Amino acid sequence: MRKTEAVFYADTYHPIQAGSIDGTDTLPHDSAVYRAWLCSSAALYDPSGDPKLIGDPYFTLFVARLSPLSTENTLRQAMSKYGRVKNLRLVRHIVTGASRGYAFVEYETEREMRRAYKEAHHSLVDDYEIIVDYNRQQLMPGWIPRRLGGGFGGKKESGQLRFGGRERPFRAPIRIPYDDLEKLGIPPPPEGRYMSRYQDPSPPRRKRSSVDREEGTHRRSMDREANIHKSNPADNDDRFHKRSMDGDYHSSRRSSDESAQRHRSRSSRDREEGTHRRSTDREASIPKSSPVDKEESFRKRSMDQEGRSFKRSSVETEEFHRSRRSVDMEERSHKRSSRDRDERSHKRHQSRHYERSTSHDRS
């Protein structure tokens, strides 16, 4: 992206910077900018002092360039395509009651608000192309409204040029006078973090604390319970019966597992006690013998072991000789049969040769 095509958006509002093309002006270029600058310096504007402000600003959108014929119903119908509209206020003239061409729309959730912020921008409502922005009056630090010379709107023929908003972003500056901007308290342009004109600037997000997270989880749980209660009572009974059956099943399974574990531990303990008792009984049943008796019993056991090993070796040798004899007999029979076949084939060959010779002599 070339720098000549790059833009940036204002995070905080300053009247002199808002009246500049690239955000680097240090002097007001018209009387409206000067009036807004004086109002900002003297802190004459309170963004939360409007008694008509209702709802959460993080869920609220600013909709402008509406048709004079647009009503609350048509606007609600058009903005309900992007989410559930909670509150809607169409700003009207205090004397005539005619529409001023802008409104504030509050959604149920921040997610729905962001969807409308992205998709409803430059859409058609009553054949008028609208613009959508977030609620800068309450969320943008230093904001000065249009009636006091501020804002981001304005027309070229009236001399009011306002840049930095979503519809008119700042151009990428060629040279940034850091010293002059610092003297006036104007935030310098964010060099190196520019965007394309086709990118949507993200609206500010709420800084969530631990209390907000707890409230959000509590609200979700309450909504879930309310949805459950709104369902059919028969479904609730079935769900309760199923939950109770599952609880009974899990409890019975847990009790059966515990009983099986106790049975296994008891059986292993009984087996150990039984083996210990049998060993002690065997030791008690063996009479106490003298050293001579021990030697004789040892000699007898050794003689029995030698006899068994001798018998085993003799049996193994007999089987080996028997298998060897059978192998030799098979080899001899194979040799004999091969020799007989050779002799028979030789005799047949000699007889054929003799017959050929006699037939030749006769001819």
Image (cartoon, rainbow, N blue to C red):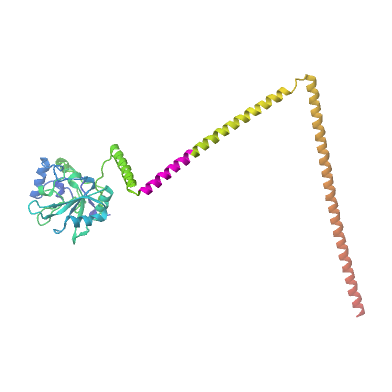
In the foreground, 311 or 52: 52
Query: Is residue 199 visible to the viewer in this orientation of the structure?
Result: no
Residue plotted at (54% across, 34% down): 261
Residue plotted at (89% across, 68% down): 350
Magenta residue check for 230: no
Q: Residue furthest top?
A: 290
Q: Main secondary structure of the magenta part?
A: helix
Q: Is residue 299 left or right of residue 245?
A: right
Where does the C terminus fall, quadrant-wise?
Answer: bottom right
Query: Is residue 247 visible to the viewer in this orientation of the structure?
Result: yes
Q: Is residue 260 left or right of residue 235?
A: right
Indicate the position of residue 2 as horizontal and vertical percent values: 26, 54
Which residues fall within the magenta stretch? Answer: 233-251
Indicate the position of residue 226 as horizontal and vertical percent values: 31, 45
In the foreground, 247 or 345: 247
Indicate the position of residue 250 as horizontal and vertical percent values: 47, 40
Numbered circles on residues, count: 0
Q: Is residue 263 above or below residue 194?
A: above
Q: Is residue 128 left or right of residue 159?
A: right
Where does the N terminus fall, quadrant-wise?
Answer: bottom left
> Residue 73 is drawn in which quadrant?
bottom left
Residue plotted at (7% across, 52% down): 95
